[in-house]
Image: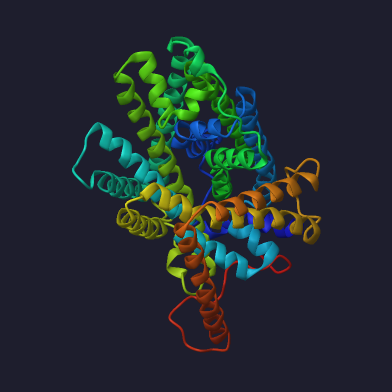
Amino acid sequence: MEHETMQEQQAGLRAVQRDEAAPRPSLRVLDVMALTVGIVLGAGIFKAPSLVAAQSASAEALLFTWVLGGVASLVGALCYAELASAWPHPGGDYHYLYRALGRGPAFLFAWARLTVIPTGSIALLAFVFGDYATQLLPLGPYSSPLYAAVLVVGLTAVNVAGLRQGTRTQNLLTALEVLGVGAVIVVGLLLAPAPAPVDAAPAASAASGTAWGLAMVFVLLTYGGWNEVAYLSSEVRGSRRAIAWSLLASIGLVTALYLLVNVAYLRGLGLAGMARSEAVAAELLQRAVGSAGAVVISVIIAISALTSANATVLTGARTHYAFGRDSVLFNGLGQWHARANGPARALLVQGAISLALVGLGTLTRQGFETMVEYTAPVFWLFFLLTGVALMVLRVREPDAPRPFRVPLYPLTPLLFIGVCAYVLYSSLAYTGLGALAGLAVLGTGGVLFAVEMARTRRAAHGTPSNTTTTPRLQRTKEAT
């Protein structure tokens, strides 16, 4: 097994020796942290706190919920840290599912990544950017979709140009985003006047299990996205443990910022004021600096959406590339552009699908809400299966080198699986037609998998085919 793992580590080197472009270690820990923080620290922190406050019985309960969200994310990060350090691969979850559960679940996950999860997230973030950019410079009745389309095209072009351009853009945007959140924290803690006693009073009692559960759904959605770092695991310099520690450090930083910004909201608006607010950050800045606050917060939120979108564009295409390397139907995606050091074709296809989803959101006239409903159930389903894969691989590959091991095993992954199951249920129970659309698209993946297997069998029996016929990724016990 150790020899097998060493072969996996040297795969990129052998590809270069054969003049075949492949991912290579070129990302610093700082780059990985910027990508992780950039994805997680999104525009949600400027909206979700008011929703959580409406479900919280006290300020202490509000802050505890955000702490709990950080702990839950840390539990998940510990699980991913073991997987990413043991099996660094551009496919991330796709690779883990393939090794543990087989080709079928991995195929469905890759199809979901191509059509629902990162593409839907990119469209969602593009609408957030469009909504707030329109506040600064409206472009007419279709201003938000126009801005959204420009964002998708622009960020796709930046990342097609090369990994260096994508990561430099990300580092700059993440720095601006952290500074923006820091500005909100400083304003709330030091400049905003204290709310009137009536405003400071607790919100209406929301101590029921349903209310707390809804609050956790909002919090965990705001923390979402840290798992994207798994798709960069084969491109990180240094030891395998570097990916684990960069992930854990990023979650710690985001949790601290989320707590501080909620303390700032409480200091400036009070719990009841937060619960009543439709735009909690904008209201806080308006109380502190007047009408200019609305402009400032629009800029900060637009930058946050732009930051998360760029990181999602960069990481999302890695799965498509790994999928294409193994698939008969989608083999065209499995090409790595040597000069750009990235999956250029996968990026272009991802951009085209994201643009189509922007069009879908425009037709429904509820772009943001539609994309949330579209992506959430499918995302949490495969999140849960990745937790299962960790436990399966512990049994199936007990001797595989694991530079980082999940502490308190098996309690930690079982807790992660439980959280995923709860949020999966909630995402189905509280969403509408968008969720059904996402699940329907996932269902078409089952039909495509049947076609994939049929073509693979024909190729194995010598039937002429114009596509690549031999999957490059094998199951756990086979040669890798």
Q: Quadrant of residue 206?
A: top right
Residue 461 coordinates in the image, percent (x, y): 57, 89
Q: What residue is shown at x 42% (from left), y 68% (from top)?
A: 332
Residue 198 coordinates in the image, percent (x, y): 50, 16
**Height in image: 289 above or below 272?**
above
User: In this orientation, which residue lies closer to the viewer: 82 or 408?
Assistant: 408
Residue 218 in sight from this viewpoint? yes
Question: How many numbered discs, if any?
Answer: 0
Q: What residue is shown at x 64% (from left), y 61% (from top)?
A: 97
Q: Is residue 202 left or right of residue 385?
A: left
Q: What residue is shown at x 57% (from left), y 22% (from top)?
A: 202
Residue 20 in sight from this viewpoint? no
**Height in image: 4 above or below 186?**
below
Residue 246 coordinates in the image, percent (x, y): 60, 35
**Height in image: 359 above or below 369?**
below
User: In this orientation, which residue lies closer to the viewer: 215 or 255?
Assistant: 215
Residue 110 coordinates in the image, percent (x, y): 53, 62
Q: What residue is shown at x 43% (from left), y 52% (from top)?
A: 371
